[in-house]
Amino acid sequence: MTEEIYDVIVLGGGAGGAPAAIRAAQLGGKVAVVECENFGGQCMNRGCIPFGHMMVASNILGGLSLGKEMGLHFSGISKDYATLIKRQNELIDFMRQGVEGTLKKNRVKIISGRGKIAGKGKVEVNGKSISYKSIILATGAKWLKPEFPGADLEEVVTSDYLLNTEKLPQRVLLFGRSPWLIEIAQFLHRFGSQTTLATKERNILSDESKTISSRLRKALKKEEIDIKTQGEIVAATKKKDGLHVELSSKDGLETVVVDKVITIERGASLKDLGLKRINLDEDSHYLTVNSKMESAIEGVYAIGDLTGPQSKHFSHLASHQGIIAAENAMDKDASINPRTFTRIVFTQPQIACVGLTPKEAKDAGYDVVVGAAPYGMNPFGMIISENEGIVEVVAEKRYGQVLGVHFIGTDASEMAGQAVLAIQMEATVEELSRASFPHPTLSESLAEAARDALGKPIYLP
Ligand SMILES: Cc1cc2nc3c(=O)[nH]c(=O)nc-3n(C[C@H](O)[C@H](O)[C@H](O)COP(=O)(O)OP(=O)(O)OC[C@H]3O[C@@H](n4cnc5c(N)ncnc54)[C@H](O)[C@@H]3O)c2cc1C
């Protein structure tokens, strides 16, 4: 029997792999995707979609105070977590079927099983060898064990725990620097858990613009979420009344008694992919690729969480990279635009940061100008009592090219799309300032922040 040869084999059908396979097929390739669990990967099954769904529920609860201000009174609010989980599982099922259907419609061959490179141009799945001209590695990241005494206890869990339980922990410590922990902290707090959020960093979201991280911290503190910075778990010990966690932080050493510690530590796992067989390094933390998503070996591409540290683990980045890798595998010439790298957190207030922070822009050697427009000065912002919200535009002084736009507040993640477009199209602050955004909307603050960067705000005092 002749062995099947594919133009492109995609290993992993998650956030990056599925669009990669579809794009390669659209370009006329004979394509196969190998998936060992569920299509949609971490994002659809255990990340963006379930937790995005939970954050919508959390935001509904957060919006009740605005309703009250407007004379809408709600009584007897009950929170049924089992129903929430049931609804999101149905949604995930539906979306998964959508991915599988789209792959099939594009004539992508679906192969179920765990794939491994078997040698140059060969992949082994379920003991069978298949051949490729190009391969796109899209196998994502895996859970890493946190490193502290007691980390092996069953009470120390990952965010997956919340997807498999019908009852939320009453007392919980969320430990780490992942943005998803901040979302989860707010969700659990609003659903009635006693919540502590601890990070090793000097602040939550410490890599982002100071304006954004400090406003988020203030908002969470106002909601009475306990935040510990410069934190370290010294040890966790199981006792009768719960897990005793010795936590050292900027506030000193204390014992926090909880039911669960939730951590989110993820890293690429290069060891299981057979990389050595094609002379690729499998001892690094992640697989290094260039802007075309090419590895050091011709015809071998890699995308998504497999290719970067946890601070770069975003679904939209993985899918963008997937499309680029697919186009290059099909003899096109595509490159990633690092300037539009977007980070989001679906807390309330929401966070969305596109491109360079003021500090990153300065460190990159730009002469930087920053403009800002608070939502509190925006008519729609006033309607919805949005006090923490702000848009911050970062540009270089000489030509006014927009280098970054940072949002905190309602609909930040939706508005970030406008900023992505502006940066992608190399817009200047002058051009942004002249855009006529609809009224009354929060997006008007984007033009006002650009006008502020030019020193001519219209509505700011
Ligand atoms: C709690 C949480 C919340 C998140 N929320 C968001 C969010 O709101 N927005 C956002 O942008 N990002 C979010 N992320 C990050 C996002 O999930 C990832 O960045 C994204 O899924 C990465 O896509 P990927 O294709 O690289 O990997 P994945 O989506 O994980 O896909 C990898 C796929 O490869 C399969 N696979 C692995 N090994 C093999 C093998 N050897 N053979 C065959 N198949 C294999 C896996 O089963 C999986 O389906 C979240 C992450 C977490 C943990």
Image (cartoon, helix red, strand yellow):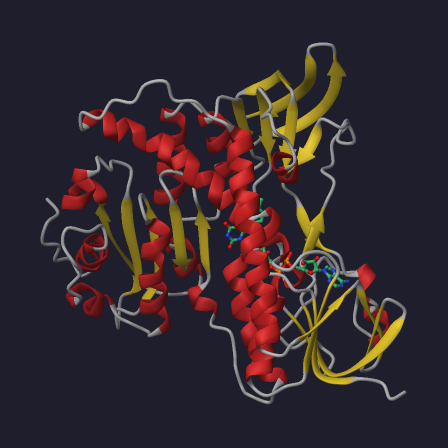
Any part of residue 205 in sight: no
Q: Quadrant of the N terminus?
A: bottom right
Q: Number of labelled discs? A: 0
**Residue lying furthest top in this view?**
240
Identify the residue shown where x is 29% and y is 22%.
74
Identify the residue shown where x is 51% and y is 32%.
185
Ligand 1, image quadrant it occupies: bottom right
Rendering coords of residue 297 (x, y %)? 74, 80
Rendering coords of residue 352 (x, y %)? 39, 51
Residue 128: name its quadrant.
bottom right
- Nearest the viewer among 14 and 94 is 94
Residue 86: name its quadrant.
top right
Drawn side of residue 231 relative to residue 404, left or right: right
Rendering coords of residue 207 (x, y %)? 48, 48
Identify the residue shown where x is 51% and y is 41%.
87
Q: Quadrant of the C terminus?
A: top left
Rendering coords of residue 62 (x, y %)? 35, 31
